[in-house]
Amino acid sequence: MHRKTFDLLAVVGGLVLAVVLVVAGGLLLWGHNFVNDQVRTQLAAQKIYFPPAGSAPIKALPSTDAKAMTAYAGQLMTDGVQAQTYADHFIAVHLREIGGGKTYAQLAEASLASPKNAALAAQVQTVFRGETLRGLLLNAYAFWKTAQIMLIGAIVAFVAAGVMLIMSAFGVAHLRHVPAEAEMFSKGDATAHTPATVS
């Protein structure tokens, strides 16, 4: 094969790959923006505010949870990290206190065994509502995290496309200096690898 032909194929292949990477990066970036906007819009619509720093709800929390909540004190919840913090360091703490460390499933089972226990039934309802809200917030966090991964993927795709374009440009420059009659492998190389015949 002529060296010029090989270089031309390599350049075309590099350009095609660069286009594919740019398209992939564009789709990933679009996905990131869409998911991020949806999470932000839906969370903001709920009007969930973190308790102010030093307030009674913050002071009542264990130190680790209080520290996590204080980082967003007084803020409106608008992103996935805030949703996870509120779910795991605020709602989860109160649910453990309300349920005595028992899960909704355990409390519901106990309530079914004692159908006349109104206090236990109310406890089950409260824990159910809390777990539902917590689950929704953690789903928002999962979607938000997915959007962040898509953004990283988009950046990698764009960088890789840039690298391929640069390599293709070098390929074009090299293509101009290669003689038309140049071969990929010279005849000398071919004969050098030919096994010697035994007479």
Image: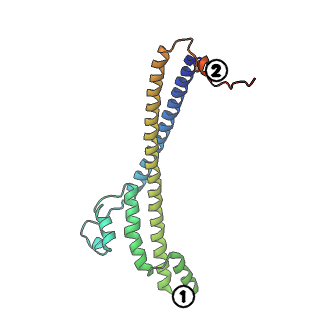
Judge whether residue 45 can be spotted in this image.
no
Cβ atoms under marks 2 and 1 closer than 8 Å? no
Q: Could you say whether the residue bearing mark 1 is in a helix, strand or loop?
A: loop
Which residue type carries mark 2?
Thr
> Residue at coordinates 50% horizontally, 17% vertically from top-left?
175
Q: Residue at x 40, y 56 (%)?
A: 80
Report, in whole angstroms, how far the alpha carbon at label 2 lies from the one at label 1.
96 Å
The answer to whether residue 135 of the structure is visible from this angle is yes
Q: Residue at x 54, y 21 (%)?
A: 7
Q: Position of residue 158 (x, y in %)?
A: 44, 36
The quarter of the picture where the C terminus appears is: top right
Q: Amino acid at mark 1?
A: Lys
In this figure, which residue is indicated by the disc labeled 1? 116
Label 1 crowding class (10 Å Cα cut-off): few <14, some 14-19, many 20+?
Answer: few
The one nearer the camera, 165 or 27, is 165
Circle 2: element type = helix
Q: Which one is in front in this view, the residue at disc 2 or the one at disc 1? A: 2
Q: Nearer the viewer, residue 118 or 8?
A: 8
Q: Provide the residue designation for mark 2.
A: 191
In this rendered view, identify the residue nearer to me: 1 or 61: 1
Q: Residue furthest left?
A: 54
Q: Position of residue 17 (x, y in %)?
A: 53, 31
Residue 105 in which image quadrant? bottom right
Residue 155: x %, y % from top left? 43, 40
Q: Is residue 134 above or below residue 107?
A: above
Horizontal relation, residue 52 to residue 11: left or right: left
Residue farthest to the right, as pictured: 199
